[in-house]
Image (spheres, helix red, strand yellow):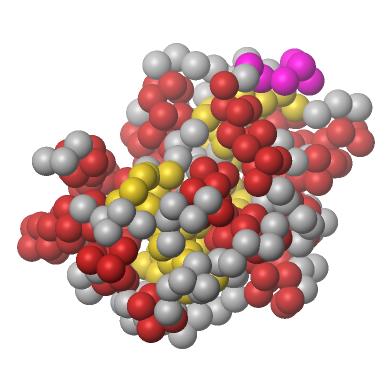
Amino acid sequence: MKTTTLFLASVATLALALPAGAADPQLLVFDWAGFEEPGLFASYVEKHGQAPSYSFYGDDDEAFQKVASGFRADVAHPCSQMVSKYRDAGLIEPWDVSRIPEFANIDPEFLASPIFKDDAGVWYIPTDWGATAIAYNPDLVPADDVASLQVFLSPKYKGRTSLPDSSDDVWALAYLATGVTDWTVISEDQFKAAAAWLREAHKNVASYWADPAEMSQIMASGEVLVAWSWNDGVAYLQDDGYPVAFQREATEGSSSWFCGFINLKNGPGSEDKAYDFINSWLRPEAGPALLDAIGYGHTNAAAMALVSLEDRETAGLTEVNAPVLAQTPNDPAMRERQLAEFEQIKAGF
């Protein structure tokens, strides 16, 4: 992986506050900050002579609310558990996969849901994936302490932990910590146990991080010793020489997630260019570019075949010998309940 400084990561955060860049006016991509990586749309630039225009968001729920409120873009990049909300709201239309040659090379596990693919068509093109697990400072935190997710409840780390300001990630943690590895069907008792665990974990939290740059900065400062982190934040710290390790094999396990592109209805730009964009993203050469620049895996098996085992290990994306809670689509009503409960927990209730 290339060296990524915390300063450059902070630039991606700053981009959230900026308007879309002046680029191709015929394609507007609504995306997470930091994904405007040239290696991902190289063939688009070769064909059209300029990059797509981008508008950025900070989290999935914010993005959905903006689109639902009338914001118009051509494509957007939600994670998998959000797709049903876009479908139910009538905001997206199916992709014509006959125009996407590399669709056939997407690992089938990323399409194993009728929410993504049904008789009406293909509603979602999965593109990138990553892991959420324990990031910790090995100089100050013994490995035995992070052998369990209960480290987030330990009085030893009161005021020295950080959790993501992401309902999906914190509930994945809470469910794992209370013995649940599949969140597609959650009982009332399981929900209550996970909520009670999160309330206890909240007592140790120094801050909730909003993006990998923020997580990296608070760990680099020494303020936080243990965090529930995406793998890219760990890579930022390791590349910059900070002491950090990534524990994906805690007794209770870790989490995985994936994101991809939806075709928004009534986009203001060119439908042909939307397909040129997704075809650039899915070409095999985008796999190394994605991992090198951002630290995530690619859903195209041919793309991942171009990524070395060493680079996968550095990024924290190899197989693990522990349970994994996959953040696949879950019950929309339960997800909304989790989101509301998380807001209450953060507020101290």
Q: Residue at x 46, y 29 (%)?
A: 63
Q: Quadrant of residue 245?
A: bottom right
Relative vertical location of residue 45 with respect to residue 68 in this rendering, above or below: below
- Magenta-colored span: 19-26
Relative vertical location of residue 140 with respect to residue 42 in this rendering, above or below: below
Q: Can residue 151 be seen in this view?
A: yes
Q: Residue at x 77, y 55 (%)?
A: 3
Please count the marks in the image: 0
Which quarter of the image is occupied by the C terminus?
top left
Residue 175, how many percent across, how many down?
A: 25, 64
Q: Quadrant of residue 240?
A: bottom right
Q: Is residue 255 left or right of residue 345?
A: right
Which quarter of the image is occupied by the N terminus?
bottom right
Q: Which of 182 and 348 is in front in this view?
A: 348
Q: Which of 323 and 156 is in front in this view?
A: 156
Q: Is residue 280 left or right of residue 60?
A: right
Relative vertical location of residue 30 with respect to residue 136 in this rendering, above or below: above
Q: Majority secondary structure of the magenta segment?
A: loop
Q: Quadrant of residue 156?
A: bottom left
Q: Can residue 181 be seen in this view?
A: no
Relative vertical location of residue 223 with respect to residue 153 in this rendering, above or below: above
Residue 305, how many percent across, how many down?
A: 75, 71
Residue 34, how many percent across, how many down?
A: 65, 39
Q: In this view, does 285 lie to the left or right of 167?
A: right
Residue 24 covered by magenta stretch: yes
Q: Residue at x 77, y 36 (%)?
A: 276
Residue 115 covered by magenta stretch: no
Residue 283, how many percent across, how many down?
A: 78, 53
Q: Which of 127 and 104 is in front in this view?
A: 127
Q: Residue at x 41, y 63 (%)?
A: 226
